[in-house]
Amino acid sequence: MRRAALALTAACLSALASLPAKAEALIAALSTHRIAIASNFTGDQLAVFGLVERDGRSVARADPYDIVVTVRGPQRMLIVREKERVGPIWINRNQRRFPDRSIYLSVATNRPIKEFLSEEAARRDRIGLANAQRPPTGFDFEFDIARFRDALIRTLEGRQLYTLDERGVTFLSPALFSSQIKIPAIAPTGPYEVEVLLYAGGSILARQTTNFEVVKTGAEQRMTSAAHDRPLLYGLATVAVALLLGWLATVIFRRD
């Protein structure tokens, strides 16, 4: 019985040893995990550094590496309204709601996406501005949702909150790469997720995620905290300041 157990254990170890070792591992890090917003904030940027570790025993890979860095910001309910002109005025005709959509979205790659991924693979892996926030099933259930989604992307691109840079990842060596994440002045506060994908031959080899946070500091943070923690006192103080400024304006600019 003992011999049979030993034989079974040896067989299991032999089977595990015969499994192919994982050829690549991905290590990614950020230059900072916290961006502070003050009254003079005009935007900032942080760097993503990554390293591809490869099993030295494996043969050289014929396909080059490709990197996709996707940054997703805080999620909110976003509404897109379609306007139509009726006579001399414009009115809202249709609208679509996009729940749990990132206000900030950035996609950076080392070369154009279509050069290493098919459209079907990009949709499946949620790569690109149009695909990064698709439902997990990969399908939109309303037939006309695409034009509202495209309008949402165009609007946020115009505000520099959605960006696509297909030359935004630079290989410093065959295994070391970097990318810059630009945070605009109107970036929302909250947590941001950074997802780094390693591709070769159109297949995902490794994935790494990390996070950073955009926070308010100084007087802005104290005012925000007061408005949330003590809304009644904050409201009374706001009214008092408005009355005081109004009284001072009448005193300064009154005519005798």
Image: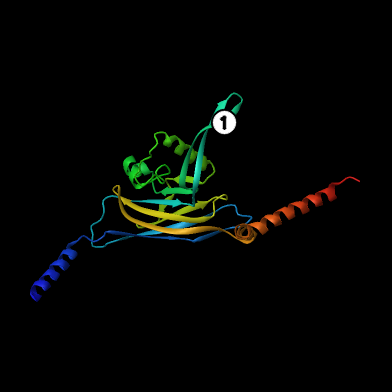
Percent x, y for residue 18?
Answer: 17, 63
The residue at the point 35 percent across, 56 percent down is 207
Percent x, y for residue 116?
Answer: 33, 45
Which residue is the site of mark 1?
91
Percent x, y for residue 214?
Answer: 53, 57
Percent x, y for residue 253?
Answer: 84, 47
Q: Is residue 243 above or below residue 1?
A: above
Other residues around mark 1 within 10 Å, as few (<14) / some (14–19) / many (≥20): few
The amino acid type, in three-letter code, at marker 1 is Ile
Extreme residue toward the bottom, this view: 2
Extreme residue toward the front, this view: 232
Q: Quick check: can you spot residue 228?
A: yes
- Quadrant in the picture for residue 150: top left
Q: Is residue 26 above or below residue 81?
A: below
Front residue (pair 213, 204): 213
Extreme residue toward the top, this view: 87
Q: Quick check: can you spot residue 118?
A: no
Q: Is residue 64 left or right of residue 228?
A: left
The residue at the point 16 percent across, 64 percent down is 15
The residue at the point 86 percent across, 46 percent down is 254
Image quadrant occupied by the N terminus = bottom left
